[in-house]
């Protein structure tokens, strides 16, 4: 007889299996609704894009109330290298370099992923208004499977399904194009397509798989409405083999570069409501709630996400305000 805890785990396995190719394959990278608040983790080309050193921590509690649902956390920093060499900024629009790093954990029931990456980007001025940067992530990913957190529907004593862990070298590349009023970029992740011990393929748990190469495309703009209001429309498109293309369409309104609210739609998944504030010039806090739209939404009570950031401004800069990103 199944205990309540085992029954919940069984339901989790059934749900994840039914969502298999849509979720497990599509979300081999950490998923965040507030990608504009922590953009470096989706594209290394954005490393050092702004004229401040930034620390960012984010936590996402997906499918609240559903045991074994995804829990994701990241911590990152990035800075242009000239801030480390001196406490004065280069002239606006000059070519420069950026460095950074980020770590993440992503737990989904018995499957636990994590990684550590260093990042580097070179920013080149291509015209009076436009900059282009090329960046890379180099690091390692870890994959763990904890069999005690799963109940197999078929053959629950299968000896092939065991606790396992693997650590692999990983790499990503990204390009970012930006001006005062437009930003866009494309990035490729898990370029080495490392082997992992378990994977969900077409709703079936297999004892072999890969971190699939995946891509994302970000496009957006900054539109001044008046002296204090600014609109920031954006779209993020994510693609990975074996799963439908997923996209987020968002509109963000910023007041006085301190307060903002946003609404986003993720196709076949959720409506997202977001808000944030900048305190004491350099500290940022933001929150988002994903209201599920799929059939699975009746089994959980939404997704919560919080992002905290701190920006160290140097030189003559009066405020740590983003100029080329959001």
Image (spheres, rainbow, N blue to C red):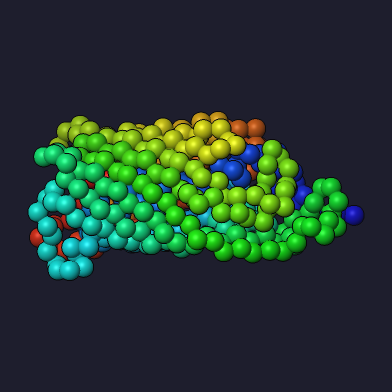
Q: Is residue 3 left or right of residue 203?
A: right
In the image, 21 versus 287, the foreground residue is 21
Considering every residue shown, the one lying at the far right of the view is: 1
Q: Is residue 14 above or below residue 150?
A: above
Quarter of the rendering containing residue 180: top left
Q: Is residue 116 left or right of residue 124?
A: right
Q: Is residue 258 above or below residue 115?
A: above
What residue do we see at 22% from left, 50% from top?
123
Q: Position of residue 236 (x, y in %)?
A: 41, 37
What residue do we see at 36% from left, 54% from top?
136
Q: Position of residue 261 (x, y in %)?
A: 35, 40
Q: Is residue 223 left or right of residue 273?
A: left
In the image, 280 versus 314, the foreground residue is 314
Considering every residue shown, the one lying at the far front of the view is: 192
In the image, 104 versus 226, the foreground residue is 104
Q: Position of residue 129 (x, y in %)?
A: 14, 39
Q: How many marks?
A: 0
What residue do we see at 56% from left, 38% from top?
241
Quarter of the image where the N terminus is located: bottom right
């Amino acid at each position: 007889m199944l205990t309540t805890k085992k029954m919940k785990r069984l339901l989790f396995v059934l749900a994840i299996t039914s969502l298999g190719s849509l979720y497990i394959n599509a979300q081999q990278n950490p998923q965040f609704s507030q990608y504009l608040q922590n953009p470096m983790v989706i594209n290394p080309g954005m490393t050092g894009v702004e004229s401040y050193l930034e620390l960012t921590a984010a936590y996402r509690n997906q499918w609240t109330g559903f045991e074994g649902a995804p829990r994701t956390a990241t911590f990152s920093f990035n800075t242009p290298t000239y801030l480390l060499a001196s406490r004065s900024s280069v002239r606006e629009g000059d070519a420069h370099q950026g460095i950074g790093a980020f770590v993440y954990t992503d737990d989904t029931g018995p499957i636990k992923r994590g990684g550590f990456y260093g990042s580097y980007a070179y920013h080149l001025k291509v015209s009076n208004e436009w900059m282009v940067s090329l960046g890379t992530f180099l690091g390692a990913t870890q994959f763990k499977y904890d069999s005690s957190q799963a109940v197999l529907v078929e053959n629950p004593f299968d000896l092939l399904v065991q606790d396992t862990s693997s650590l692999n070298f990983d790499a990503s590349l990204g390009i970012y194009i930006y001006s005062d009023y437009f930003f866009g970029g494309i990035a490729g992740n898990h370029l080495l397509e490392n082997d992992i011990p378990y994977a969900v393929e077409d709703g079936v748990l297999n004892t072999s798989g890969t971190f699939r190469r995946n891509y994302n495309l970000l496009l957006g703009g900054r539109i001044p409405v008046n002296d204090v209001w600014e609109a920031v429309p954006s779209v993020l498109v994510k693609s990975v083999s074996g799963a439908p293309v997923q996209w987020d369409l968002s509109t963000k309104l910023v007041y006085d570069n301190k307060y903002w609210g946003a609404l986003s739609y993720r196709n076949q998944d959720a409506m997202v409501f977001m808000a944030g504030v900048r305190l004491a010039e350099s500290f940022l806090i933001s929150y988002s709630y994903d209201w599920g739209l799929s059939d699975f939404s009746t089994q959980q009570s939404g997704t919560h996400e919080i992002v905290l950031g701190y920006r160290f401004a140097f030189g003559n800069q009066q405020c740590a305000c983003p100029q080329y990103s959001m």
